[in-house]
Image: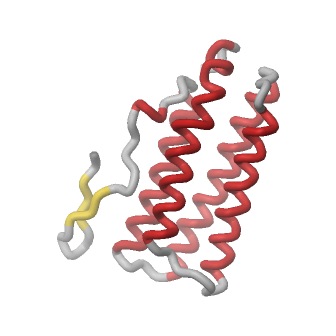
Amino acid sequence: MEYTFNLNGVFMSNLIDWSDRYSVGVFKFDNQHKMLIKQINDLHMAMRIGNGKSSLITVMDNLVKYTVEHFADEEREMQRTNYPDYMAHKREHDKLVEKVQDLRERMSSGKIVVTMEVMNFLRDWLTNHIAKVDKQYSDHLVGQGVK
């Protein structure tokens, strides 16, 4: 677990810590998952220390952009290796991208603020997606030689 202190010396922990239970056995995707976790932790930290709306939107923009890039990488490998559950997995990706983009738009327009409810949604979705849905492609991709 990583420990962080804010400018006032108050202890703050990460919202998500990487664990081997999230590993899908594909180096590139594990690193991308670690980066997604870092970005959610960055958003959480920005919210906790009271960063302004523009800072939060910038962090959220980075999360949206990286999520789209990561999903595209996974989908390319699934298509290349003829992953049998590709369409179901892609639908999961599309739903999250839509949800995160909607959150970002609502933040930008002032309709919502980043709250623990938003952070818990992102944490739960990401950890459940990696630990359950992404684990389903793990054996297939590794078996196809994807490292």
> Is 135 on the left-hand or right-hand side of 41?
right
Which residue: 48% across, 57% down? 40
Q: Is residue 103 above or below residue 143?
A: below
**Picture quarter containing residue 65?**
bottom right
Number of numbered discs: 0
Which residue: 26% across, 69% down? 6
Residue 107 position within the rendered picture, expressed as x and y whole percent measured from the top left? 60, 78
Residue 108 position within the rendered picture, expressed as x and y whole percent measured from the top left? 63, 80
Depth check, front residue: 32 or 136:
136
> Is 120 on the left-hand or right-hand side of 135?
left
> Is 94 on the left-hand or right-hand side of 41?
right
Q: Is residue 82 above or below residue 72?
A: above
Depth check, front residue: 28 or 74:
74
Residue 47 position within the rendered picture, expressed as x and y whole percent measured from the top left? 42, 73
Which residue: 51% across, 73% down? 56
> Is 103 on the left-hand or right-hand side of 54?
right
Q: Quadrant of the C terminus?
A: top right
Colour pattern: secondary structure
Which residue: 57% across, 70% down? 58
Instruction: Spot the residue most to the left.
Output: 9
Instruction: Spot the residue most to the bottom.
Output: 110
**Picture quarter containing residue 106?**
bottom right
